[in-house]
Image: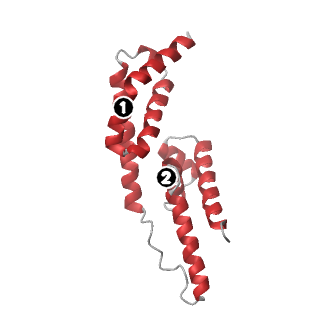
Amino acid sequence: MLKKQREATGELFERNKGNLLSYLTRRVGREDAFDLLQETFARFIKYNRAHVVADPPPFLQKIAINLARDFSRRRETEARYLEFGDLPMEAPSPDGSPAARLEAEERWRKALSAIEALPPRCREVFILYMHEGLSIAEISGRLRISRNMAQKHMRIALGRCWAALEEDF
């Protein structure tokens, strides 16, 4: 029985991936479309009653539409609250030596690059924690992910930021 379900899901994927990928690429761009396509099928598989869906392609399309909508909302929120690239007024101190200022500016640029390079969900958790001051529990509730997953995203984000700052220093 399980083998038949896997084969049916595989066939469903092969028949629908082109249309879904095309739709997602138009909505979110090619870079993120593949991740959302994968998430579309992951959610379909997780759906406890997927075997009773009368017409799976429209159901998959609805999942993809919702994922693209959520993705766009997240991007808008990030754009509203984040302005990467501008150095804050308090860093670096004008009283420091030119070498210290250059070092501080370079560290700031590396930190920003590391944050921008994070996977979307990981970056979102990091921003909610660092910028909005939400707790891990609040973040997991808001994003509808487990507390462990929110902690994992935060560990990844902090690890990559620290790794970027430790390079060359």
Q: Quadrant of residue 114?
A: bottom right
Looking at the picture, how far across and down is residue 24, in whole percent? 36, 38
Above or below: residue 21 compared with residue 162: above
Decide if residue 157 is on the left or right side of residue 142: right
Where disc 2 sits, the SS reads helix
Front-most of 7 and 121? Answer: 7
Looking at the picture, how far across and down is residue 121, in whole percent? 50, 47
Badge 2 or badge 1: first in the primary sequence? 1
Q: What label sits on residue 20 in the rendered view?
A: 1
In front: label 2 or label 1: 1
Above or below: residue 100 compared with residue 165: below
| Residue marked by disc 2 | 124
Residue ID at (45%, 26%): 44
Q: Quadrant of residue 58?
A: top left
Is residue 49 among the parts visible in the rendering? no
Decide if residue 85 is on the left or right side of residue 157: left
Above or below: residue 101 compared with residue 114: below
Is residue 12 among the parts visible in the rendering? yes
Front-most of 64 and 130? Answer: 64
Where disc 1 sits, the SS reads helix
Q: Amino acid at mark 1?
A: Leu
Looking at the picture, how far across and down is residue 13, in whole percent? 43, 24
Residue ID at (37%, 45%): 29
Residue ID at (58%, 47%): 150
Q: Quadrant of the N terminus?
A: top right
